[in-house]
Image (cartoon, grey):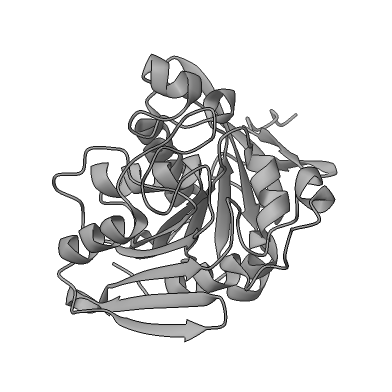
């Protein structure tokens, strides 16, 4: 009799099913839940892989805001549908205790010095090994505390070809940022992360540079030409072309608060009679920006 061949399999939880794959990485389409050990902690992340992908697809890492989760970000911001159309992979990592250590904010990760830069770097390395991802087209985007974390990654690593920040700011030290294209979306009436940089009204009392000052910082870091301004109803776009094909865009939404434009409304927002329809879809805007930039 022939001896049975030794086979190593890994079970990956997929939305609605349990799939079997070998240890070369996520071989199934749809959403898989992944774990890795980093800094003596078990970290979790979700990966969405469209059924059809190019040989070396881009990767978009979506970082939830404070009190959010990767599952919430996947549900709320609409990245999966764009991944299907655009042929890219999306990762939705979980911050510990629903927050990220992004240079002094937020929650337990900041107080205890959680190594979120190391975790996200290892997660991306694992995805590059298993899919494989095009390292020249890795993008980071986030909401609020997630936007701060995306900026921290841009300041402390050279991974991202571009960063998309929504309703966030830069709190981390950033003396030598890696050349990175940046698009920043912010509402003028954001009370949590204020446009003028004053302390916010949220629990974290976030203060930092004003949004225009932050935009000037990235334009200087990327060696940009003077920006050009366009206005479309409530949306003002300040666009700067920079060295080596990079760009730095600031998208200001008049009257908008602390939210991701185009995302599903929270229960409180649905009850607010003053809530207004969003001026545009930030997810589509950010992906169009990402698609035009690579390392």
| x, y percent for residue 57 | 49, 66
Q: Residue at x 36, y 71 (%)?
A: 249
- Between residue 166 and residue 16, name the one nearer to us: 166
Q: Residue at x 63, y 30 (%)?
A: 6
| x, y percent for residue 210 | 33, 52
Looking at the rendering, which quadrant does residue 250 occupy? bottom left
Report whether residue 21 is seen: no
Left or right, residue 132 beside residue 215: right
Q: Residue at x 48, y 40 (%)?
A: 145
Q: Is residue 38 above or below residue 124?
A: above
Q: Where the N terminus falls, by quadrant?
A: top right
Q: Is residue 295 above or below residue 106?
A: below
Left or right, residue 36 beside residue 79: left
- Between residue 288 and residue 105, name the one nearer to us: 105
Left or right, residue 102 beside residue 269: left
Q: Is residue 8 above or below residue 29?
A: above
- Between residue 109 and residue 47, name the one nearer to us: 109
Q: Where the C terminus falls, by quadrant?
A: bottom left
Left or right, residue 119 beside residue 81: left
Looking at the rendering, which quadrant does residue 283 occupy? bottom right
| x, y percent for residue 54 | 53, 72
Report whether residue 142 is seen: yes
Looking at the rendering, which quadrant does residue 281 occupy? bottom right
């Amino acid at each position: 009799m022939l001896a049975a061949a030794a086979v190593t399999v890994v079970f990956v939880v997929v939305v609605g099913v349990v799939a079997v794959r070998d240890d070369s990485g996520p071989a199934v389409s749809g959403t898989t839940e992944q774990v890795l050990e980093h800094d003596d902690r078990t970290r979790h992340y979700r990966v969405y892989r469209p059924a059809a992908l190019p040989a070396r697809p881009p990767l978009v890492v979506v970082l939830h805001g404070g009190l959010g989760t990767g599952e919430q970000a996947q549900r709320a911001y609409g990245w999966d549908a764009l991944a299907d159309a655009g042929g890219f992979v999306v990762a939705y990592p979980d911050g510990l205790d629903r927050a990220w250590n992004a240079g002094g904010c937020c929650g337990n990760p900041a107080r205890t010095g959680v190594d979120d830069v190391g975790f996200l770097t290892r997660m991306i390395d694992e995805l590059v090994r298993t899919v494989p991802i095009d390292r020249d087209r890795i993008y980071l985007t986030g909401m609020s505390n997630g936007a701060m974390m995306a900026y921290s990654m841009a300041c402390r690593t050279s991974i991202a070809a571009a960063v998309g920040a929504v309703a966030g700011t830069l709190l981390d030290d950033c003396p030598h940022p890696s050349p990175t294209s940046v698009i920043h979306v912010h509402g003028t009436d954001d009370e949590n992360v204020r446009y003028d940089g004053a302390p916010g009204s949220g629990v974290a009392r976030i203060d930092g540079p004003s949004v225009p000052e932050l935009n000037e910082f990235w334009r200087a870091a990327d060696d940009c030409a003077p920006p050009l301004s366009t206005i479309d109803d409530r949306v003002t776009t300040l666009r700067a072309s920079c060295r080596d094909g990079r760009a730095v865009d600031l998208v200001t939404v008049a009257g908008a608060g602390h939210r991701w434009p185009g995302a599903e409304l929270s229960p409180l927002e649905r009850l607010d009679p003053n809530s207004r329809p969003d001026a545009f879809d930030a997810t589509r805007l950010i992906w169009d920006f990402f698609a035009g930039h690579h390392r």
